[in-house]
Image (cartoon, rainbow, N blue to C red):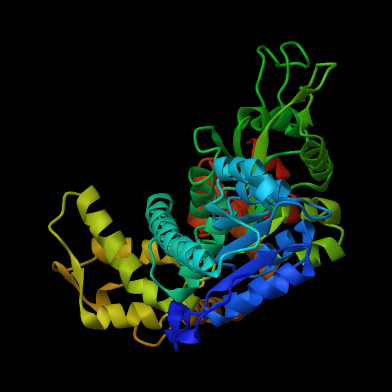
């Protein structure tokens, strides 16, 4: 090594208070590591030392490194193995090869693989300083480009998701991290939080974006039809099979299958889905051979899986297969900063769809919206905005024109008050029914009023279709599903 000059000649030594760059030094020769480390430190950088390729990869995985000084000949994994790993895993780490003079052809090969530059031993300190400075400058520029690309991609794939709160931005950041992988994602969140929007965004930002996105409502799949719906059937395989049918999993070949309301899936069907996930093969009803299918699974639920697994309502092995990457969607009450944005968006959307003059909320109305807890989340907010727009008296919507929201009084309190009044009226008439009896009666009346249409029935009751299916099973009303 050549003798270094005074510390002040190194630019890094003058950067007090500025960001310190991490320089990873991978060399199996201890003397070489220490000498390079000494001068790297004097230049104002922070050296990190490893002695083999495996240790180098682990260090790059666990801690942010800004440049890598990499020896070619190392135990366990050599320089080429490390370069291949960085390339395959899209780790934008500038690499400076450090090699003996007789290994220059190998260093040139590394340059072709993407290395920034190479140095020969014994390393010239002046040369090391220049190459490190240039590599770090290039690294900064590359990181800025990556950041801009990430921001552009975020705007593109999340264009349907409105929000600026820290809670929703954290969720978007997590989604971006897993988006381009093939990990199965389990989206968790309350009803009405926008789980399907995130599922669609995950697909649109993935390498499967040009493939199909197949959405499946698991709660609506009966055990009798599960095989046919999920895996398909061939003509003549059973009574009524007049044509070949492609199942949901095969429809999602080279794309994404979204299993919505996965927590409501029948336990018998769970075993069949687990096998499809494990084998990545399906067999149509009536076929003797299996066929390979290439799909990614995104699932969603508002249920508590720990309780469902404990009560043997959901298979633990399927849960762990689905939850390779959990993604939690925050409820609207944890996104207070987004309520005004969402409310204004829904109001503009309603006015545009109905050819109305532009509408707006009064400040008092907006304050009332923000103060409310929104147990029904975004779906409930949208409904409230639309009702307010319909019942408005001018182009400005005042607080008193937003049904069911009155200052600090919550919707839940209003509903409870109505229930109390109804309960008292029934008690006076001597016809007090149990809660379950009243609920069952309400379902029957709504079903009759909607002429057997389950979607309309659920809407009349103010519940989701999946919830309606559970209640039909609970009250022994399964026959209404096929009415």
Query: Would you place residue 188 above or below residue 184 in this image?
Result: below
Q: Nearer the viewer, residue 349 or 20?
A: 20
Quarter of the image with the N terminus is bottom right
Residue 301 in view, yes or no: no
Residue 120 placement (x, y as % from top left): 62, 56
The relative height of residue 384 versus residue 175 in the rendered view (above or below) is below
Q: Is residue 147 shown left or right of residue 476? A: left
Residue in front for this viewpoint, 144 or 280: 144
Q: Quadrant of residue 55?
A: bottom right
Is residue 358 visible to us here?
yes
- What is the quadrant of residue 41 in the picture? bottom right
Residue lying furthest front = 2
Residue 248 locus on image (x, y percent) = 65, 32
Task: List x then y, in percent, for residue 318.
Answer: 80, 50
Q: Nearer the viewer, residue 297 or 316?
A: 297
Tally the marks. 0
């Amino acid at each position: 090594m050549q003798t270094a000059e005074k510390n002040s000649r190194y630019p890094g030594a003058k950067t007090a208070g500025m960001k310190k760059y991490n320089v990873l030094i991978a060399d199996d020769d201890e003397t070489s590591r220490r000498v390079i480390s000494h001068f790297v430190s004097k230049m104002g950088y922070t050296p990190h030392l490893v002695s083999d390729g495996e240790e180098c990869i682990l260090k790059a995985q666990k801690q942010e490194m800004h440049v890598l000084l990499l020896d070619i000949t190392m135990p366990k994994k050599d320089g080429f193995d490390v370069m291949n790993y960085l390339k395959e895993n899209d780790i934008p780490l500038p690499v400076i090869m450090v090699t003996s003079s007789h290994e220059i052809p190998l260093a040139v090969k590394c340059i072709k693989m993407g290395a920034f530059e190479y140095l020969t031993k014994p390393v010239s300190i002046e040369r090391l300083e220049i190459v490190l400075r240039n590599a770090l400058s290039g690294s900064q520029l590359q990181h800025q480009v990556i950041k801009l690309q990430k921001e552009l991609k975020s705007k593109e794939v999340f264009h349907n998701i409105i929000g600026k709160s820290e809670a929703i931005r954290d969720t978007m950041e997590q989604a971006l991290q897993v988006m381009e992988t093939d990990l199965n994602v389990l989206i968790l969140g309350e009803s009405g939080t926008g789980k399907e929007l995130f599922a669609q965004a995950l697909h649109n930002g993935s390498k499967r974006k040009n493939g199909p996105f197949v959405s499946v409502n698991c709660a609506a799949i009966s055990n009798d039809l599960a095989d046919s719906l999920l895996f398909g059937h061939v003509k003549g395989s059973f009574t009524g099979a007049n044509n070949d049918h492609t199942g949901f999993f095969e429809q999602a070949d080279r794309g994404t299958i979204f299993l919505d309301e996965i927590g409501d899936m029948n336990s018998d069907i769970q075993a069949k889905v687990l096998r499809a996930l494990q084998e990545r093969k399906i067999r149509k009803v009536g076929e003797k051979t299996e066929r390979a299918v290439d799909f990614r699974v995104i699932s969603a639920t508002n249920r508590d899986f720990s309780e469902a697994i404990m009560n043997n309502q959901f298979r633990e092995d399927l849960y762990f297969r689905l939850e390779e990457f959990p993604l939690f969607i925050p409820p609207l009450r944890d996104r207070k900063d987004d309520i005004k944005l969402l409310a204004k968006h829904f109001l503009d959307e309603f006015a545009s769809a109905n050819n109305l003059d532009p509408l707006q909320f009064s400040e008092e109305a907006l304050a009332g919206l923000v103060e409310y807890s929104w147990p029904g989340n975004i779906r409930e907010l949208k409904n409230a905005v639309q009702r307010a727009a319909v019942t408005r008296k001018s182009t400005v919507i005042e607080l008193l024109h937003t049904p069911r929201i009155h200052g600090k009084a919550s919707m839940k309190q209003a509903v409870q008050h109505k229930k109390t009044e109804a309960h008292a009226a029934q008690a006076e008439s001597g016809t007090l029914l149990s809660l379950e009896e009243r609920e069952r009666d309400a379902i029957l009346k709504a079903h009759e009023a909607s002429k057997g249409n389950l979607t309309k029935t659920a809407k009349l009751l103010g519940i989701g279709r999946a919830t309606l299916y559970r209640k039909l099973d609970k009250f022994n009303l399964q026959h209404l599903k096929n009415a």
